[in-house]
Amino acid sequence: MVQPLVVDIEAVRTFIAVADTGQFQEAADELHLTQQAVSKRIARLEHSLGTTLFARTHRGARLTLDGRAFLPHAHEVLHAVNRAAASVRPGERALRVDVVHLRISPAQAIRAFHRANPDLDLDVVTLPGATVSTAVEALLTGEIDATFRAVPSALPAGVTAVPVLNEPLQLLTGPAHPLAAAAALRPAELTGHRIWIPGIKPGSEWAAFYRELAAAFGLSIDRIGPNFGTEALMDAVAESAQLATLIGAGDRYVWPAGHDLRRIPLTGPTPIYPHVLLFRSDNRHPSLAALRRHLSATRSPDPDDRWVPDGWRA
């Protein structure tokens, strides 16, 4: 069995420095090391490779034939490592932004940001099963740079919250629903009608939001049954005379034209879902500042009769 080769990347970096300068001392000065440290690194690299890379002379260090053969590959290795580091290092990698779902309004806002700033590197992700708590953990560990979340409670130190998108809710019904012909509805008019939102995650901020919404207006919101995704939800609503669901005014779900679904604004008051941009306070990614400026410049004014749960950031 062939034993795997273990090569120290700093030794490779030192090898290239010595090859470029032709002097151990000059390479040491360039790398901010002692000459002894450079010599030890080269010795370990030669031992790992089982060959001599430099011929030591009174004039300096001259590449051997094996050293010349190794040099272009050493450059490739170092470039690959630098590219790999840049792909995950904040400020060099793409701005990584988390959205709960790719069809809801924060994702549409990020899409508009990308259209306005096509030269900025952007990575849009959806953390699997994440709540505001787990998203904040991902922020603090540097896994993501920003996330759109509703914030019902206090945040840990080091996390900044900026309200950016307060989204009015709409009732979505099929054509046979008794409220389907309404041009607008007051939340209280939904009392007695079944509002179905499968997939509400217990303990999540959106579960808390819908719980408070239901309590404030006497609504029946349930998550009974398995969650087969948004397409299945739209199918069920289209076919039913009893089921309805709630969506954001900026959400961009897609359904067949034959479903004839109706989006009915809620007003008097207007319930809004408060999307807040969260990011680590010490994050200096240049594209994060650009995103904040864009969201501030494009933010729509809130309706005068807005409703949000008490104590929530909005």
Image (cartoon, rainbow, N blue to C red):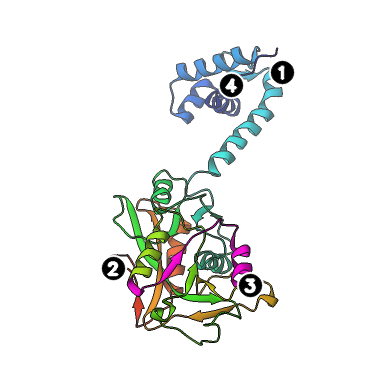
The amino acid type, in three-letter code, at marker 4 is: Val
Q: Nearer the viewer, residue 204 or 49?
A: 204
- Report the Cα–Cα distance between label 1 and label 4: 20 Å
> Given the image, on which type of amino acid does mark 1 rest?
Leu
Residue occupying image coordinates x 42% and y 81%: 189
Label 4–label 2 contact, CB within 8 A? no
- Residue 301 image position (x, y, % from top left): 40, 79
- For disc 1, the marked residue is 65
Q: Is residue 303 visible?
A: yes
Residue labelled with disc 2: 310
Label 4: state its secondary structure. loop
Query: Of discs 3 and 1, which sits in the foreground?
Result: 3
Q: Is residue 236 magenta?
A: yes
Query: Residue 9: percent from the left, percent from the top?
Result: 55, 27
Q: Earlier in the sequence, mark 3 or mark 1?
A: 1
Earlier-in-chain disc, 3 versus 2: 3
Counting residues from the start of the chain, the first of labels 1 and 2 encountered is: 1
Q: Position of residue 121 (x, y in %)?
A: 56, 56
